[in-house]
Image (spheres, helix red, strand yellow):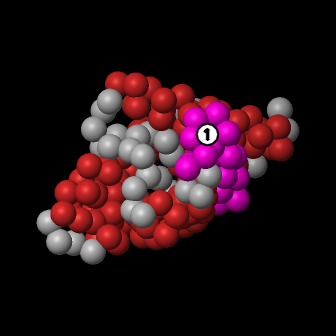
Amino acid sequence: MNKNTSAITISALGIGLNIVLATLAKALQIPFLFLDTLGTILSAALLGPVFGAITGLITNIITSVVNNPVELPFAIVNMMIGIVVGFIVKKFGFDFKIAILTGILLSVLAPLVGTPIAVSLFGGLAGGSMDILTGWFVKSGQKIFTAAFIPRIMSNLIDKISSCIVVSMLIAKLPGSLLNKIKG
């Protein structure tokens, strides 16, 4: 399998993982766990920032058509995750410690990018479980950005750190010969 075929296959796998795991997490109603970017993180870790961003973009295009059009503007968040992870892995690798630190960084960056989208397009609500907390913070006197940001950062701390750890563990289990073929 040549490098282009490997990259397309891994990106498609990442898109599928994003969609299937997000659907599973939603069906099981696991609080603060979305798993909707695990495939993006995997693609970015294996292929770099460009394929990570492409994986994130295509995921949100598909989910906005199949599930909910509200998901399309958040493609920017998923793309940013792919870019950040791709650059971190190029510079530092993706062992357990780097995965945790990357998850913490994504836990802040994703809400910093996603909250303005949610506030400007949807009044801070995006139709998810976090809307309850957002409403509660608004009622308690917080400004809409803060009210929308706090629940997002809380949930992302669990979701992004968990996703990065899982990807780190998956990569650690891959044979070195396969990793060499993927990375060229």
| Residue at which label 1 appears | 63
Q: Residues within 10 Å of mark 1 (few under 14, many from 20)?
A: some
Secondary structure at badge 1 equals: helix
The residue positioned farthest toward the bottom in the image shown: 143
Q: In the rendered view of the protein, which quadrant contains the N terminus?
A: top right
Residue under the image location 32 percent in, 43 percent down: 129
Where's residue 119, x and y in %?
Answer: 43, 67
The residue positioned farthest toward the left in the image shown: 140
Where's residue 151, x and y in %?
Answer: 28, 57
Residue 156 is at least partly visible in this image: yes
Residue 114 is at least partly visible in this image: no
Q: Is residue 76 above or below residue 171?
A: below
Q: Is residue 44 magenta?
A: yes
Q: Is residue 145 magenta?
A: no
Q: Is 57 left, or right, of 139 in this rendering?
A: right
Q: Is residue 41 above or below residue 110?
A: above
Q: Is 38 left, or right, of 82 in this rendering?
A: left
Q: Is 137 left, or right, of 25 in this rendering?
A: left
Q: Which residues are magenta?
A: 42-71
Q: Nearer the viewer, residue 181 or 79?
A: 79
Where's residue 115, x and y in %?
Answer: 42, 65
Q: Nearer the viewer, residue 43 or 154?
A: 154
Q: For the stretch drawn in magenta, what is the main secondary structure?
A: helix
Residue under the image location 82 percent in, 37 percent down: 5
Q: Is residue 79 above or below residue 41?
A: below
Residue under the image location 38 percent in, 44 percent down: 128
Q: Is 21 left, or right, of 3 in this rendering?
A: left
Three-letter residue code for mark 1: Thr
